Amino acid sequence: MPASEPTFSALIRQLPPAVRPIVEAARRAVTSVAADAREVPYRGGRPRSASTMWKLARYGGEEGHVVGIGAYSRHAMLFFYRGRELDDGTGLLEGSGRVMRFVRLHTPADAEAVAVQRLLRRAFRLGGGLGPPRGRPPAPRAASRRAGWSSASPAGSPGSGHHP
């Protein structure tokens, strides 16, 4: 790995001591469910604000990213790239975004919980979302079904995702 690329282990060493064991437990939980998943550390660096999540790594396969691990100063998060599609049934998944959902982890035991393991297994069975893992060219985009709503629209127009 080039010197400019962070390793997950290096990122963990930069975390506040209170959250390190939680993040390590989250990593063990992910790798125990999907040992062959590709781990891709984020390159964004430490956030400027303690109230901002530090995205540490994402895991996935050929279809794209499945789950990511992030940290705040006192807790960690597992965020699921296709979380809206997961059948939780336990109330663990939080969030109301169009696609992603997350689980808060306040202790290492939270990451080791049976319900979290079940969510991770379901997420990896469901597959990836939000783009392919790094190093793989993106697949061609499908045309939009709605007239006037194209992914090729300029910023600020329908379909661009950018609204003034």
Image: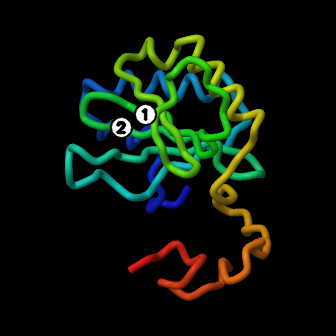
Secondary element at image label 1: strand
Q: Looking at the picture, how far across and down is residue 73, in whole percent?
A: 25, 35
Q: Residue at x 58, y 49 (%)?
A: 99
Secondary element at image label 2: strand
Task: Give the farthest residue toward the bottom.
Answer: 154
Which part of the image, by quadrant, shows the N terminus?
bottom right
- Tell me the number on the disc at residue 77: 1
N-term mark: 2 or 1: 2
Residue 158, relative to residue 133: is it above or below?
below
Q: Looking at the picture, how far across and down is residue 148, in whole percent?
A: 67, 83
Which part of the image, by quadrant, shows the C terminus?
bottom left
Q: Residue at x 38, y 31 (%)?
A: 76
- Tell me the number on the disc at residue 71: 2
Whether residues under marks 2 and 1 lie with C-beta atoms below 8 angstroms apart, the answer is yes
Q: Looking at the picture, how far across and down is residue 41, in whole percent?
A: 50, 49
Residue 160, relative to residue 5: is it above or below?
below
